[in-house]
Image (cartoon, grey):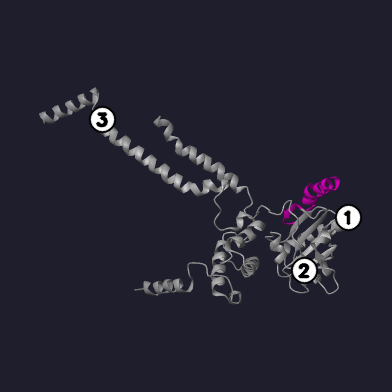
Amino acid sequence: MNRILLFVPLAIFAVTLVYFGLGLRQDPSAIPSQMIDRPLPAFDLAGLEAGDPGLSNTDLLGQVSLLNVFGSWCPPCAIEHPMLMQISRSGRVPIYGVDWRDEPGAGAAWLARHGNPYSRVGDDAQGRLAIDLGITGAPETFLVDAEGRVRHHHVGIITEDVWRNTLLPMIEELERS
Amino acid sequence: MRLAPFIVFALSLLVVAPGHAVAAPQPDEQMEDAALEERARGLYRDLRCVVCQSQSIDESNAPLAADMRAIVRERLLAGDSDSEVRGWLQARYGDYVLMSPPVQGNTILLWLFPLLALGGGGVAIVIFFRGQSARADAPLDADEAAELARLRDEEGQA
């Protein structure tokens, strides 16, 4: 009996080791999204420049689309940008942009310099929509179905791999149903 | 004596660098209504900055934390109760946005663990000392009695 008790601390240590070991494999900055399967909040953002149509939640109805949150101040967004251009050129799905917390004119200048992959862009200078969407950083992208419901929330850069193995299969699935 | 300047320097650091984080809200974030401002400050401390993670939005200078504070003020002005304000952000960022996790199924172990550890440790200590005193009071068995008698005899002869 006492012999067995001697091994209790070792057993507790082993259990803790496994538990924390598994914890280390998780990304602590990834917060589970609350948006999945919920309709987009109602919004109506101005365009980046005078004469731009801007972006409202009703623009995303009727077709599967991507809603991408970016900013000219955001280095990872510049890394992601060529992939968005490629998706845009392929014409597979429309991409809508939310320019998050940018100085006036900075977003438009950035798009003029790097190219504009977005069907429409809204200016979220105050960052209100970003919080409504539960954004923690840029870039983040939502996959939105034809009814305007969020089906997937991707935090971080859309790489070739994310596009081909995550987003594209989900888009095909949504378009089939 | 050589130490004196260092001690003065070390003490001055205490004055210059406060141990606790200085509140981040800027003067222009002050609400006009003092009662609302007090509630706002309480809520800032309850809500987590989702980009800085181990700071509340009261402590964080992050732009997103400033935006979240602006929303707290806006909700308060709209007449929301404190729990409605927390709920508004919780609906968007999940339980994670609350500095203290709510007591519910998946957090019950977290909340109860200190009590369990204290109780378990207490029980272990009681069992340990009971065992010790029980052993001390137990009557001697035959071998022990013989050994004791032998030692006594040796002592008697000495």
Q: Name the residue under label 2.
A: A123
Q: What residue type is labelled 1?
A: Ser
> Was residue A56 drawn as part of the magenta stretch in this picture?
no
- Is-magenta flag for residue A152? yes
Q: Do labels 2 and 3 share a chain?
A: no
Percent position of residue B123, x then y: 39, 40
The alpha-carbon separation of the residues under discs 2 and 3 comes to 84 Å
Mark closer to the chain start, 1 or 2: 1
Are discs 1 and 2 both within one chain?
A: yes
Q: Which residue in the protein does label 3 denote?
A: B138
Crowdedness near tag 2: few (<14), some (14–19) or many (≥20) residues, C-alpha within 10 Å: many
Q: Position of residue A26 (x, y in %)?
A: 63, 49
Q: Secondary structure under badge 3?
A: loop
Residue that numbered label 1 is attached to: A90
Graded by Cα atoms within 10 Å as few (under 14), some (14 to 19) or many (20 or more), the crowding at tag 3 reads: few
> Which quarter shows the N terminus of chain B?
bottom left
Q: Where are the magenta residues, as a range? A: A150-177
Residue B70 picture quarter: bottom right
Amino acid under label 3?
Ala
Picture quadrant of residue B48 = bottom right
Of residues B45 and A57, the one drawn nearer to the viewer in this rendering: A57
x then y, percent, for residue B46: 55, 61
